[in-house]
Image (cartoon, grey):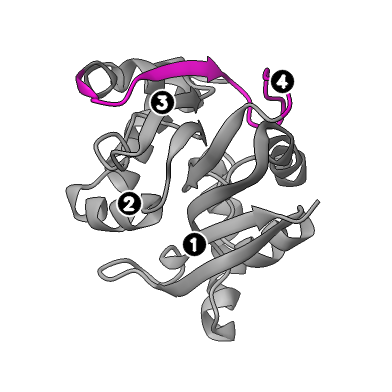
Amino acid sequence: MGFYEDRILPHVVALTCGMPAMRKIRRKATVGLRGEVVEIGFGSGSNVGCYPDEVTSVTAIEPSDTAWAMAADAVAASTVPITRGGLDGQRLPFDDDTFDAALSTYTMCTIPDLPAALAELRRVVKPGGRLYFLEHGSAPDEKVRRWQRRLEPVQKRLGGGCHLTRDIPTLLADGGWAPVELEQYYATKTPKTFGALSIGVARATA
């Protein structure tokens, strides 16, 4: 990664995705999580403090050393044990059926090979385990989608590969995860091009 991606972008992501006003929706996204959890795109630890009491451990997948360093205080203060378990959600260094559940928040927009990451999550999550997600992506309105397509090239450059047009529920289904709970809406006080949210829970279909 270059200087911007390695040193500047983690701070930008922490500022935009870690605002205190987003804590409520992050808590909503983690309702039902339990046991040993693998979290892809851990970032600077914005979900720390939002895990339910039933979560016994979190294994964080985070490629950025800067973001992981930024998370140090939150990780140290967490009542849930958190360890950094890997760098790449597309290649998880764990045995099959290792985790009880998986968590992804504002991560599926950026992973270069999302189908590979979803396949890896299917592999490492135990049968019957669920994937909990909170993601932004393709808007329900064509007028907004047109703007998303126009802005996406700039967003990808400034946002470290972040896409605006990914259809998260469809990509989940294509990747072997069937949403069993799904809510979609525009985030308040956020431009619609960036604020079309999908929040829910999915189960593995294969």
- Mark 4 or 2 closer to N-term? 2
* Along the viewing direction, whichever of 62 and 9 lies nearer the viewer: 62
Work out how far the residue at label 3 is from the one at label 2, CA to CA, in angstroms: 17 Å
The dot on residue 57 is 3
- Mark 1 or 3 closer to N-term? 3
* Along the viewing direction, whichever of 145 and 103 lies nearer the viewer: 103
SS category of the residue bearing label 4: loop
The dot on residue 5 is none
- Mark 3 or 4 closer to N-term? 3
Q: Which residue is drawn at 71% across and 59% down?
A: 171
Work out how far the residue at label 4 is from the one at label 2, CA to CA, in angstroms: 28 Å
Magenta stretch, main secondary structure, is loop
Segment colored magenta: 77-96
**Which residue is label 2 attached to?**
26
Work out how far the residue at label 2 is from the one at label 1, CA to CA, in angstroms: 11 Å
- Mark 2 or 1 closer to N-term? 2
**Which residue is label 1 attached to?**
200
Q: Relative to 123, say whether 3 is above or below.
A: above
Q: Residue at x 47, y 25 (%)?
A: 60
Disc 4 marks which amino acid?
Asp
Circles 1 and 3, Cβ within 8 Å, touching? The answer is no
SS category of the residue bearing label 2: helix
- Mark 1 or 4 closer to N-term? 4
Is 193 part of what is drawn in magenta? no
- Mark 3 or 2 closer to N-term? 2
Disc 3 marks which amino acid?
Ser
Work out how far the residue at label 1 is from the one at label 3, CA to CA, in angstroms: 21 Å
Disc 2 marks which amino acid?
Arg
